[in-house]
């Protein structure tokens, strides 16, 4: 459980950002941001002044928020007339997370606080949250351990002739029994994912999801994930799942094969391990995210597999790693255009993958923490293909 000391460290870090930007405070309305600073996900608005005590204003459930939150100022959400009285006239410049706040909500708070200037603090908020405390790293390690425990069970139930959907259902059943919460929170607009992906040759398909692999899904309304396709012999079975425990998300992929594997796919898998090893060794403070991505692309291209790297030819994702924590798409991103240095305590899912039309998907994914000596592998089970 979040402690008061941990919460106030987060608040203090955010307050330093607000002061540096010349802001008087910030309003947080997005649930996972409120949870990060307060310890409760109840329907609330959080006011963090540039200095002083934060105020959590709760719509529902106030009773539960008082039990769960470690903040000292917790009160019912005030009426429209009362709201502005909480903010003195000196509070003129207010931070707001434009990346996730609907225009309707911005307009609502602008009416509650007329004459104030609302300033986007989306990047600053994500930067603060990207660096994990010792408490958060421990939550991620526990999440990874539970996720790994289910991956270890796959040889017990993966059988030739089962559908992708059957495999997904069995994996997800065991993951839920292990305590997985299931909510895969993502910040990006228009992105959604149901727990993970269990795919065979159907993985080599186009899709809207901003990742290397999507799967066919069950309909045009749900065009990702497992399909009714039968799992056969001598084809890679691709399992890409998240563990969500106490809100914290870890992400990993493993490959299983019933029979033998096409030599081209084996070559691609070996290359994915080579790219992962390079990136793991480079996950040190000061390393530039874009440069790591470009180096991964260069390794793939030199091996003659650049056209298959990170997606279907012509539909490739332009990243090879993404931050994880309370959301699946946190900072930092190992991507073109993300020219920022890594920091100790950031956690990143590294996922070099190759997609081959009509053959399937091959690759690896693990969650790492940035340290002075390179990436600490949090999803700590063997990377090799499991042949059945």
Image: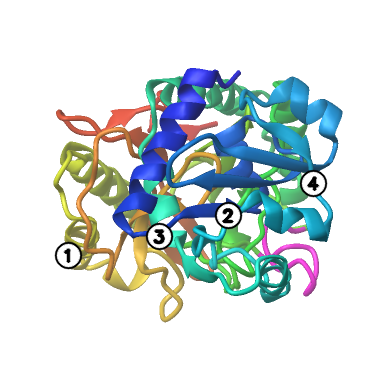
The foreground one among 175 and 263 is 175
Residue 141 visible? The answer is no
- Residue at image x 50%, y 64%? 92
204 falls in the magenta region? no
Kindly state the secondary structure of the residue where label 2 is placed. Answer: loop
Label 1, on which residue? 298
| Camera-side mark, 1 or 3 | 3
In this picture the colour scheme is rainbow
Mark 1 touches mark 3? (CB < 8 Å): no
Label 4, on which residue? 77
Q: Position of residue 147 (x, y in %)?
A: 57, 27
Residues in magenta, as a range: 216-227
Q: Decide which of tag 2 and tag 1 comes sooner along the chain.
A: 2
| Camera-side mark, 2 or 1 | 2
Q: Decide which of tag 2 and tag 4 comes sooner along the chain.
A: 4
Q: Is residue 369 left or right of residue 300?
A: right
- CA separation, marks 2 and 3? 26 Å
| Camera-side mark, 4 or 3 | 4
- Residue at image x 19%, y 33%? 374
218 falls in the magenta region? yes
Q: Decide which of tag 4 and tag 3 comes sooner along the chain.
A: 4
Q: Decide which of tag 2 and tag 3 comes sooner along the chain.
A: 2
Label of residue 123 in the image? 3
């Amino acid at each position: 459980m979040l402690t008061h000391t941990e919460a106030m460290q987060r608040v203090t870090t955010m307050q330093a950002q607000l002061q540096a930007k010349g802001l008087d405070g910030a309003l947080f309305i997005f649930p996972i941001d409120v949870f990060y600073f307060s310890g409760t996900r109840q329907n609330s608005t959080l006011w963090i002044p540039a200095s002083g005590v934060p105020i959590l204003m709760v719509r529902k459930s106030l009773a539960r928020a008082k039990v769960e939150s470690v903040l000292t100022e917790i009160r019912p959400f005030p009426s429209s007339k009362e709201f502005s009285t909480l903010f003195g006239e000196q509070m003129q410049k207010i931070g707001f997370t434009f990346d996730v706040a609907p225009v309707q909500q911005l307009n609502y708070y602008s009416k509650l606080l007329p004459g104030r200037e609302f300033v986007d603090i989306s990047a600053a908020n994500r930067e603060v949250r990207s660096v994990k405390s010792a408490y958060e790293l421990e939550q991620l390690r526990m999440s990874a351990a539970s996720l790994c425990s289910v991956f270890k069970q796959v040889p017990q139930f993966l059988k030739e002739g089962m559908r992708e959907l059957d495999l997904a259902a069995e994996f997800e059943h065991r993951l839920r029994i292990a305590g997985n919460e299931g909510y895969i929170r993502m910040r990006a607009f228009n992105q959604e994912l149901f727990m993970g992906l269990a795919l065979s040759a159907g993985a080599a398909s186009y899709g809207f999801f901003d990742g290397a692999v999507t799967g066919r899904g069950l309909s045009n309304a749900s065009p990702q994930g497992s399909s009714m396709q039968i799992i056969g012999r001598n084809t890679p079975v691709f399992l890409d799942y998240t563990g969500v425990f106490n809100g914290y998300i870890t992400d990993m992929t493993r490959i299983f094969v019933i029979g033998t594997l096409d030599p081209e796919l084996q070559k691609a898998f070996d290359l994915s391990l080579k790219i992962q090893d390079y990136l793991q060794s480079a996950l040190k403070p000061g390393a530039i995210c874009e440069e790591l991505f470009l180096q991964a692309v260069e390794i793939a291209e030199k091996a003659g597999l650049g056209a298959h790297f990170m997606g279907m030819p012509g539909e490739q994702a332009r990243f090879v790693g993404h931050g994880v924590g309370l959301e699946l798409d946190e900072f930092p991103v190992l991507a073109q255009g993300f020219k920022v240095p890594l920091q100790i305590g950031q956690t990143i899912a590294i996922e070099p993958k190759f997609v081959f039309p009509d053959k399937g998907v091959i690759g690896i994914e693990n969650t790492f923490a940035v340290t002075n000596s390179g990436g600490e592998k949090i999803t700590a089970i063997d990377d090799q293909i499991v042949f059945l």
